[in-house]
Image: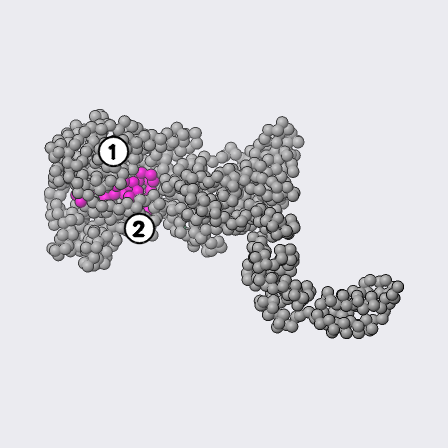
Amino acid sequence: MNNNVVIGLEIHAQLKTNTKMFCGCRTSFGDKPNSNVCPVCMALPGSLPVSNKKAVTYTVMSGLALNCTISRYSKFDRKQYFYPDMPKNYQISQYDLPFCRNGYLEFFCDDELRKVRIHRIHLEEDTGKLIHTGDIMESEQSMVDYNRAGTPLMEIVTEPDISSPKEARLFMFELRNLLRYLDVSDGNMEEGSMRCDANISLKNPDGTLGTKVEIKNMNSLKSLEKALEFEINRQSHVISSGGIIIQETRHFDERDSTTHSLRTKEEAHDYRYFPEPDLLPVVITDEEVMSISCNLPELPLKKYFRFIEELGIGKNDASTLIFDLKLANFFDECVKCKCSPKEAVKWILGDLTYFWNEKKIEPDSNVFTPLYLKEILDLIDEKIISIRQAKEVVEKVFEMIESPRNIIEKLGIKQISDEGFLIDTAKRIVEENPKAVQDFLKGKKNAVGFLVGQLMRETKGKASPEMSNKIINEILNELSPKE
Amino acid sequence: METKKFTIGQLIKGYKNKSVSPREVLDYVFSNIKLYEPKINSFVTLMEEYAYKSVESLSFDEIDSKPLWGVPVAIKDNMCVNGFKTTCSSKILEPFTPIYTATAVQRLIDAGAIVVGKTNLDEFAMGSSTENSAFFTTSNPWDIDRVPGGSSGGSASAVAARFVPLATGSDTGGSIRQPASFCGVVGFKPTYGTVSRYGLVAFASSLDQIGPFATKVKDVEAAFSVISGKDEMDSTSHPYVFSPVDKNIKEYKIGIVKELYETEGFDSEVLDSLNNVIRLLKSEGCKVDFCSLPHLQYSLPVYYLVATSEASSNLARFDGVRYGLRVEGKDIIETFLQTRGRGFGSEVKRRIMLGTYALSSGYYDAYYLKASKVRTLIVNDFEKAFGEYDCLICPTSPTTAFKKGDKTNDPLSMYLSDIATIPVNLAGLPGISIPVGLDKKGLPIGLQIIGKPFNDNDVLNFASKIESIINFEAEPSLLGGR
Ligand SMILES: [Zn+2]
């Protein structure tokens, strides 16, 4: 951690509503340009906005999950600037009365629980997209796709509490995970549904804050970290070589991981905010806040501590589980089905994750259900199959999409625990391998493994490994000279 | 057809007893328009073919369920009608054809009304004389050298000339009541929010209100009861349900707005006419008293700050990118500038600049915010007055219709003609103008009645009662030659 670095983030997250912020158009992406538009989101004369209630609820949910105070009285404002992809030439946003204020998010950084304060969360609408023919500076024409115009956008502004690029990355990771838990945003930075701007400044030797620089266009958690690293080095270098930092907006270039000046603050906009007269102020009652708060899902950090404290899972396993809500839910379901938590986590993070990844399917896809895992653990307990056979059964479940019990029935997978048969076979194998016996008598313990291996081969791997081991050992011990 | 019988009530009566058909009425309407329109210029667009088609689709079975069955109506050209140009009398919207219909217009159509055309207005409803139309100036049927008032001058004149029995207007600072007064017809601005603004091209969202023009109070009441009520497309619309009242005039306690009586600038003939009304009301046993609205003097500056601020924002969408006029420049910024520079007229530009200035950082607190606070004081004044009075009365406009060109070079004196109507918009109240007499030049004088919010039925009832006492029967001399 560097005590001389001060970072604040502004995060825009697209909300997962079916319809746009102020009209009934669909919010789906990748559709034919300008196919999801109507008079309202195209700002045709005479059209009026009508707020999407779900977007407001999602914002309040996020605020509550981020420990914010929810405003009982909020309003929308107009933020004015001319831009060809902004149909009204003003954006409906929130200025002085946002829905949420003064919260915080806790997350782990280097095994230490860190807390970053949230300054405010407000709701606004997204703009359309400009598509330039050819190079941006030289293009003869620009085309506009308004499909995105009017998509609900939640803006989360942190206090400047972050002190390293890594911490910024971990904060964003945790925030994204939280929004996914709430199911309010898919948090996909690469696809632009979650965007992040960073404000960064270095402290002067006397402890005062240096000039703030804004960085835009970071399309992944990795590029956020890289951009901040580059910027810290750049600023330190400027200062140590006697230069001064100018207030400006810089653009992060993915290709060479550097930042470039985009514009200086002198050309700052005058947004001429004023209250949106086409929408009534939003009043949120105590009952509404209470009801939203009661319906919040269990959040990642709480889940993490429950897994460790109540279910006895290791810290690393617990973090891996909570980073993927579907994985965490699968685990919870398994525990509900009475699987041993420790066994379950071993299988989930081992073989199951392997096959989910390989088959490119999600844990909640019902191909392998929590009940199947319970069946497999029971089959092992009942000594019907060995661990090795269990692994085979798991693979078969993904292939045949059938229950483990059906599979062992169909394929005849079953371990041999007929003691008489195993003793007879073992005796024969010992007789057929005098060299191994000699080795054993000379003290070479791995000769036992060899003989057990032979026994397994003889039974095509079906012999109970536990019993095989015990029987071979007994026979060999009997051959040992008695004192 | 007798012009005096060209009212909604008379039409429906005629339809019911089969003495006249909607088609015959349309024949009358369009032949009349053809005869007199060249003198008056009420219409930007005539919709003859559409009107005849609409008449054909009317079924006589629905005459009882559709309160405006077969009633010809003219629509101010800042309200959208699907498939017809909506110009706002502006060059920037001249080529614009919407693919949707304003809720208020749709409700009229659903009630059986027949849209016959779109009427002229001051560009984007900014003005008080209809001289700011980018196309042509409308004339006052009472004297074609005079203005019809504005901004709904086209609609007011169309009703005054008996082209149609009903027309719609929009009223942001008096744009229905002042032209109604100048043209000797009834013009009603309902309580803010009772009529959906969806499909009305916005001027100043927190003040704009759609309302009807007709020759009789009963007719505007009929239209209002059809167009009012909640609309899912306008979240500021109110779930107001109109129910008529029939209270005796004695039951009303009336306040005369002192500030709009004693102030200089009101014509003595206008005040004489008001005095006459007061005398008649008293003789009918109505309690009439002077009441004071101390902050009224700030209405004009407050209005021009709020209205221009909102207008500067509402008109920002006209940039040549998606619809309407586009004047290509060498890049997008120049295209914006050229389009807006050529597309907007000077009054619109003046107001956009005023509003942009009032909202800009460093001035917001001193202008817009201060204006919002004073607006609250004006609202409070009215509230206090309504603690004592059921309705307030005053002249609708300080003068009768002025000559064309008289005030075009003096925007401030033009703005003053709305001094009595503007406070009503600031407070969102219902207000109606009814004709109560003629001045020596033979020009109509209007009386404004202002009511409590959502007491539109009281305002209409009281207006109707005065109407029957005054019995204003005069018509423009133009019609004498019929
Ligand atoms: Zn839309």
Furthest residue toward front:
A483
**What separation in Å lies between label 2 and label 1 (alpha carbons)?**
37 Å
The residue sitting at 51% across, 44% down in the picture is A65
Q: Is mark 1 within 8 Å of ligand 1?
A: no
Q: Give percent across and percent down for residue B111.
A: 23, 52
Please say whether residue B457 is visible from this viewpoint.
Answer: yes
Q: Which chain letter goes with mark 1?
A: B
In the structure shown, which secondary structural element does the residue marked by tag 2 occupy?
Answer: loop
Give the residue at x 35% y 31%. Answer: B373
Q: In this view, does B186 lie to the left or right of A83?
A: left
Which label's residue is closer to the chain start, 2 or 1?
A: 2
Residue at x-position 46% and y-position 40%? A70
Residue A481 vs A275, above or below: the answer is below
- When asked about the image quadrant of residue B146, the answer is top left
Determine the secondary structure under disc 1: helix
The vertical placement of A256 against B60, above or below, is: above
Q: Give the amino acid at mark 1.
A: Phe
| Residue occupied by mark 1 | B386
Type of residue at label 2?
Thr
Percent coordinates x, y for residue B268 in the rendering: 16, 28
Mark 2 Cα within 10 Å, few/some/many (few <14, many 20+)?
many
Magenta segment includes A256: no
Task: Depth check: give the residue in front, A197 or A50.
Answer: A50
Q: Horizontal and vertical percent for residue A445?
A: 82, 62
Q: In this view, does A306 lie above or below B62?
A: above
Residue A412 pos. (x, y %)? 65, 72
Q: How would you classify the magenta stretch by its main secondary structure?
A: loop
Q: Magenta part of the protein: which range?
A: B190-218
> Mark 2 highlights which residue?
B101
- In depth, the one of A428 and B374 nearer the eye is A428
Q: How many other residues sit within 10 Å of disc 1, few (<14), some (14-19) or many (≥20)?
A: many
